[in-house]
Image (tube, rainbow, N blue to C red):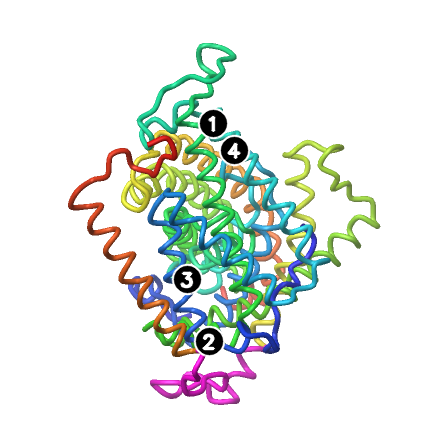
Amino acid sequence: MKNLNIINLTKGETFLHQLSGTTKVRLFATLMLYVMMSFDLPIILPLFIFSIIGIISLKPSWKVIKPLVIFVVAINILNVVLYWLANPLCGLEYTGDQTILFAYTDYLVVTKGTLWFLTIRLLKMLTAFSTSLAFIMSITPSELAAGLTSLGFPYKLGSIVEIAFRYIPDISRDYENIAVSMQCRGLELDAKKTKPIERLKQMILILIPLIVTSFDRVGNISNAMDLRGFGKGKKRSYYSEYPERKNDKIFKLIYCLITIFCAYYIISGIITPRDPKMWLYWR
Amino acid sequence: MKKESIGKILLGKWDTRTIVGVAIGIALFAVLMVYGSITVFTNTNLSLAMIVPVIVGGLFGPLPAALACGVGNVLADLIGGWGFWFDWSIGNAVLGFIVGSLKLYGANIDEGVFDVKHIIIYAVTVVVGSIFAFGIITPIFTKIIFGGELKISIAQGWVASVSNIIVLLVAGIPILKALAARNARGRDLTKE
């Protein structure tokens, strides 16, 4: 994963790009709640399909997306395997099923319940990823700040996230430059050739210049902001915000409905606990 | 040099410089979380990102450090694509608060004050803070947010604590010393 260029600084042309920042942030917040609240396939799968459609509709550059997707899928599969190794019966609590499909040793068994649980868990992680990918690709830093303020956060927090979002590509570029020039001087960073502790020590040599250059920026940026009168008023308006358009109203209805559904699902789950805790295809 | 009250040091001064500093800290945290990490266990990395809150804490105070750490973790989750783990973000924020309290015990990176005494106190806060944040706080929030899965979370917590302690001690002390030495100009003059 060598590219963090998925963050765009100017507004794009497509349908999702054209929504206002408030709509995007609120929609994303409700969708994250929607994904996290359950392990049910009928709830997660539609969002997965819609988010993939959303990503395609954003017309991304596939060259940037492809390594990212491969990396994330690989990491998540590795995670699922490690999860299974840590506790081969982890699905029991959710599915209540102990049918053994394969058994390597007494400890390492694959049960039907665990297999189903881990499959859904993987799908859930991938759904969270595809939704947040669509969100990142469609939003600009300024819209993000406007959206966060609309959720009721103080605008200084919005500004913090905005500046952070704006400087991630810059800092990752600096990181690459420093790493390459350190390698020119004979620093071995290959994971296969050096031990983790040795690598850690070598990373320090990259970190010191990176930290110094990054924090040297602080003076410049804060002076520029002070000169423009940042932080003088109690409120702040955003250049990227405008009155709701037709599309924003449609999405407002959608995220309101999703919020009501989530509230219903969570509260009903608290009042009458579901048994088993997730949707099973064999029932 | 004016002595500031403890409450003021804890909260930090929220002027433009602090806001930008925290923002840059978050960006740095997210980048290091994505690049400079070596996977150890599920959701757990030997990640160099944990250095960032220490430096933000040294420059701006504990609460900015906690914010940089917590929000940085959320942003890293957003970019890295391993899903959202708010329990870990909260644990990280607590750890950021504890290890970022450099100013409380007199170390001042801005003016180059970082001696053997401060190194020892720093090491103690790192060990206590890691165990407290990932051994206690994170499992509690895992229980509240996700319910269940506690066994794995505690195991992850211990691995995370150990790897964070290693990173914060092996990488943190040399970096803090280097930064303090860099800022130490004129220190002898003010001490007289």
Task: Give a yes or no on whether discs 4 and 1 share a subunit.
Answer: no
- Residue range in magenta is A220-247
Secondary element at tag 2 = helix
Query: Is most of the magenta stretch helix, strand or loop?
Result: loop
Q: Which mark is residue B61?
A: 3
Give the foreground label among 1 and 3: 1
Residue A120, position as x, y percentages in the image: 44, 39
Q: Secondary structure at mark 3?
A: loop
Q: Report crowding for label 1: few under 14, some 14 to 19, many 20 or more residues within 10 A (C-alpha).
A: some
Give the labeled residue for mark 1: A84
User: Could you say which quadrant of the image residue A137 lies in?
Assistant: bottom right
Residue A38 vs residue B145, the one in the foreground: A38
Between residues A158 and B23, which one lies in front from this camera angle? A158
- Nearer to me, B135 or B89: B89
List the residue tagged with mark 4.
B41
Badge 2 is on which residue?
Answer: A21
Q: Is residue A265 visible?
A: yes
Q: Secondary structure at mark 4?
A: strand
Write down the chain letter for disc 1: A
Residue type pointed to by label 2? Gly
Position of residue A59 relative to residue A1, above or below, is below
Residue occupying image coordinates x 43% and y 43%: B126
